[in-house]
Image (spheres, helix red, strand yellow):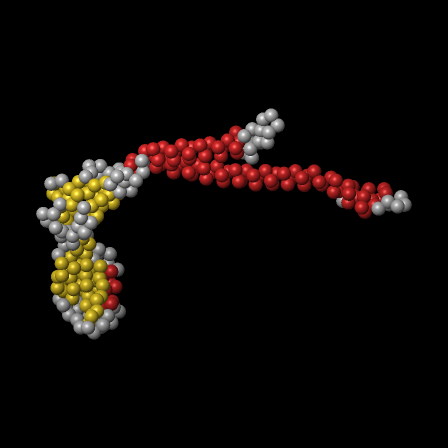
Amino acid sequence: MVISSSISNLVSGFTGVNSAQLVNDLVAATRAPKAQAVQQRQSLNQARISALASATGALDTFSTALTEILNGRQFSGALISTRGDLAAATFIPGQKPQGLPATLEVMQLASAKTVVSATYFSDANAAVGEGTLTLANGSGSFDIVIDASNNSLSGLRNAINASDSGVTASIITDNNGARLVLRGAEGVANDFTVSGAPGGALSQISAAADSIVRVNGIELTNSSNQIDTAVPGVRINLLAAAPGTNVVISGDQPTTTVKDLVNEFVKAYNDLRTALNDATAPGLDGASGGPLAGVLLGHEP
């Protein structure tokens, strides 16, 4: 502002000189190179961002191709069960299947203990009687207190579910009324007992049991119907018991060949190399350099 005022005062005495225009022109002339430099820097930064995005995309593609070519499961195709109604098989993430084909015989399914109240209640809000219900299992003993604040079928259900005992309570209703159902987790180790039950006696619907299978003639017992340890890298889900019936689990023909994976890898590598070379070209012999030229080495072009 001091310079502009001085120039304006200097030329204000000359007739025919537009001092204001002269000052504006001088200021614009001084500002133009700096504005141009800022604009060039913005354009360069935008070009760098674009080049980085392109290189990042190529790197992600290359990483995926490398992962696939190193993952032996890509060559194993899909898993097939000859009796999908008895047992299903899937890959275990991060593991390579081994020991296929395997022969499986489902001798017994794992089951959970289930009991239901013998008494019918008018609805979920009906009183069940005050008292203490005790659940006991491998985790310990759990007392569920029913008092005036929760004396109802739904109150009993909620108290059981809040006990962290591993036993789940629910209410079923039909034309005869509402009943309480208690169910534990699968397996003999998760069996439970109930004593002092408000609301009347409980009838057992099913007992806790372990699954029993024979894999290649070897009998295995598990607390679940999902088995991850019978065949390495293969998860077996048991669906129905059928002693004497063999289920063969095998892999079909690979959907991806070695040639396909190698070609994919080579293409991804070449795309990555091109993207990086274009972005970091030094600009020799008068040619324009890449937007990241010198940046990756720690200095500007």
Of residue 294 and residue 100, the one placed in the foreground of this image is 100
Q: Quadrant of residue 182?
A: bottom left
Find residue 125 and report its horizontal and vertical position in percent.
24, 72
Residue 110 x, y percent position in the rendering = 16, 51
Above-or-below relation of 256 to 121:
above
Q: Residue at x 53, y 40 (%)?
A: 50
**Position of 224 relative to 75 (above/below):** below
Q: Nearer the viewer, residue 83 or 55?
A: 83
In the rendered image of this protein, does residue 123 appear above or below residue 11? Answer: below
Estimate the x, y position of residue 188 in percent, counting from the top left: 14, 51
Q: Quadrant of residue 227?
A: top left
In the image, what residue occupies the spot 46% across and 31% down?
Answer: 273
Q: Quadrant of residue 146?
A: bottom left
Res 21 seen here? yes
Left or right, 140 with respect to 268, comes to left
Q: Nearer the viewer, residue 236 or 144?
A: 236
Residue 145, percent from left and from top: 21, 64
Q: Check the image and name the residue furthest to the left.
A: 244
Q: Which residue: 48% across, 32% down?
A: 274
In front of the other: 24 or 279: 279
Q: Answer left or right for 97 relative to 218.
A: right
| Residue 129 visible (yes or no) | no
Residue at the extreme top? 285
Q: Residue at x 35, y 35 (%)?
A: 260
